[in-house]
Image: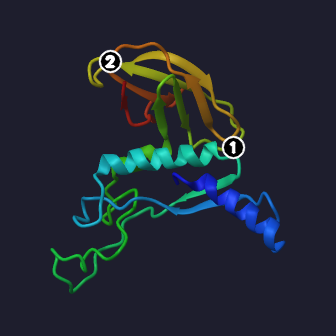
Amino acid sequence: MANFGDLGVLLDRLATKTKNVQRGLPLQAAEFGFETNPPDPFSGVPLERQAEWNVLGEFLAYSNPRVQGITQFLLSDVPPVKGKPKRSKAHWFTYQSGLQFSNGVPKPALQAYYMPLLVRPGAIWGQAKFLPDNVPANVVIQHSADGGTTWVDVARTPVNPKGFFSVPAPPTGPGLLRSRVEGLDGLTSLPQGV
């Protein structure tokens, strides 16, 4: 994803040189995901890192005007290979990039998938992915100074027709920020430190 913008440039060069494809083709980010440890002790990243990197990848895709879509790979981890020693790399040869473990237990990345939130210096970006297109809604940014016990509303912004939002970071002290859709209090993003 870090050099996804280079793909469009390369395709345009090939289009100019070969005339076999047209310039400006839209891009799709297919099979995007990161394997986790647990369960894969050989190739996985920590669960929190998976959630963080998935959100960052979605932001990079959103920021590239040629990207029309991004697909998560997979919803659920694939069970390990039967018959291989449990502590072997061969046992974990299958894909462990799901948003939930193979037994259906959610990983932190599942919540981050439904409501991605990225807090950057001076700005907050996210999406209420579960909203149908063109449904008017407002996102409330909340701050917690006590590690997540109490939350205070610090900003409010409408979502665009696809559920995305971007808002200047409100001045807050140290703590956590999260987003929630107004009127849907049970659905929030994963909190992020500020």
Asked if one can make out residue 28 in the rendered structure from this viewpoint, the answer is yes
Q: Determine if residue 21 is in view.
A: no
* Nearer to us in this view, 157 or 22: 22
Please indicate whether residue 168 sits to the left or right of residue 86 in the image.
Answer: right
Q: Position of residue 25 (x, y in %)?
A: 76, 60
From the viewer's perspective, is the residue at label 2 or at label 1 nearer?
Answer: 2
Disc assigned to residue 189: none
Give the side of residue 180 with respect to residue 30, left or right: left
Indicate the quadrant where residue 161 lies: top right
Amino acid of disc 1:
Asp
Please state which of residues 50 and 64 is positioned toward the viewer in this rendering.
64
Mark 2: few/some/many CA within 10 Å (<14, 14-19, 20+): few
Classify 64 as above or below 40. above
Q: Does residue 75 sit above or below 60 in this rendering?
A: below
Residue under the image location 51 percent in, 51 percent down: 2
Q: Is residue 91 left or right of residue 143?
A: left
Estimate the x, y position of residue 77 in percent, counting from the top left.
36, 66
- For image coordinates 39% across by 47% down, the residue present is 51
Q: Secondary structure at mark 1?
A: loop
* Pointer 2 residue: 174
Q: Going 42% across and 48% down the picture, which residue do you hit? A: 53
Kindly give the residue lying farthest to the bottom in the view shown: 83
Closest to the observer, 38 or 114:
38
**Which disc, if any, is residue 133?**
1
What distance separates the C-alpha of mark 2 from that of mark 1? 34 Å
